[in-house]
Amino acid sequence: MKIALQNCNKRGIQLSNCCFAFSTDKNFIVPTYIAIHSLMHYADRESMYKVYMLTPSNLPSEHIGLIKSLEQIYDNLEIEIVNMGDAFKDSKLVIGHTPIASMYRLVLSELLPDCDRCIYMDGDVIVCDDMSELFSLDMDGYYIGAVRDIEAGQYMAQFDYNSSKPDPEGYVNSGFLVMNLKKIREDNLVSRFLELSKERFLFGDQDVINIACKDKILYLDLKYNALVKYRFLSFKEKNYADFITKYFSVKEIHEAIDKPVVIHYAQPLKPWHTPYNYKGNYWYDYINKYIGKDVRDSWIKDYINEKRCDTKTYYKTLFHRILYKAGILRIILKAKHAI
C-alpha cells in the first residue's frame, strides 16, 4: 500500500525539516529495518521524512536493498545511505555489544550541512507513536534533547576514567537524540566530539556526548525513550522509590507506560535474543501485525534463529516472565526499593 504525501503538514512544519538518522552494520540491519518501518507506520502522513543511514563500507548490497525497500511502502519516505568507510575504527569501545557504528552520530552535523535539526535513533527501538512535534520544539541554546539515564551512574563509579568524566546527575541516554545540528555547527562542537572520541570511555559515544553537551541538554519526557532496563516501567504505582522520582514524576512514568513514543531495548538481551525480554511483546506484535510476510519469512525469522540466546539464558528470561505474570517480581522489586 502506498501512502500519499502533501507539501506541508497541519503543524506548519516544513517537509524538509523531518530529518532522521540511524547507524547500523550487518549485525543490526534487521532490527534497524523494523525500527524505521515502525517510525513510518506512526509518522505524520502529511510530512516528508528523510532518513539517513550511516553504515560501514562493508555493508552487503542486499542489506542496503532491504532498507531501501521501505521507500516502496511509504511515499513520504526518502532514504539516503551514507558510507562511513572505516571511520572511528580505532575507537576504544569497552562494552562488547556496542558497535563501532554507534560512534557515527558524533559527526552528523558535518554529514548533514543542510539539516538544522535531526532526530537520531538506535536500531534497537520500536516506535509506538508520531513524534513530528519534536521538530517544533524550542531548542534555543541547547545542543541536544534527550531522556535521562538514571542507572548509568552506578556503573560509572566503578570505571577508571582518564582525564574526562561525565556528570552522572545530568546524564542522558544517547539512543534517542533530538540534535540541534545548527548550534552544534555554530559552536564547532564536532571538534570536541572527535577529540573526546579518542579517549577510553565506558559508554563510548554516550559518554562523549554527555561530556561535550553538559549544561546544554534539554531533558525530554520519559515516553520518548522508554528504556527497557527501567524495570519500574513495568508497574504502575502510586509512589515510586526516591531515586526514581528525583528525576521522573509519577505522571511522566505512567504516561511512558500507557503511551510510549519509543521503546528502547538498551540492554545486552534484545527481543530477538529471547521473546521473554521486557516489553519484547511490542516488538513481536508490531512485526506480526504490520510487516509483510515476505520480509518476515526471508529476513526476520532467520535473523531471530541466528541470534537466539543460549538455552540457560532463554529459560532464565522465561522464569522472570513467569514471576512477572504472577506478581512475584513486583513484590521482590518493591522489597529491594527498586521501584
Image (cartoon, rainbow, N blue to C red):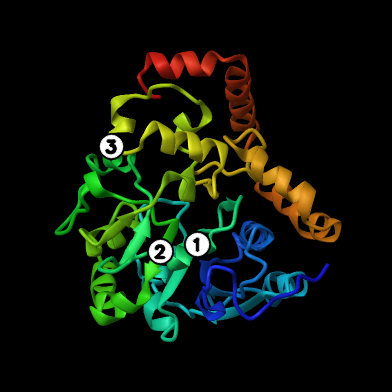
Q: From the viewer's side, name the closer residue of 208 and 92.
A: 208
x then y, percent, for residue 125: 56, 52
Image quarter hosting the C terminus: top left
Relative height, residue 133 to residue 148 (above, below): below
The residue at the point 55 percent across, 66 percent down is: 24
Question: Tag 2: residue type?
Answer: Leu
Name above or below for residue 307 compared with residue 216: above
Residue visible at 30% across and 40% down? 155
**Residue 238 placed where, x, y %?**
43, 21
Which one is in front, 321 or 14?
14
Label 3 neighbourhood size at 10 Å, few (<14), some (14-19), many (20+)? few
Mark toward the start of the polypeptide (2 vs 3)? 2
The residue carrying mark 1 is: 133
Q: Write down the residue under mark 3.
A: 154
In screen coordinates, is 310 left or right of 137? right
Q: Residue at x 34, y 57 (%)?
A: 206
Disc 2 to disc 1, C-alpha distance: 7 Å
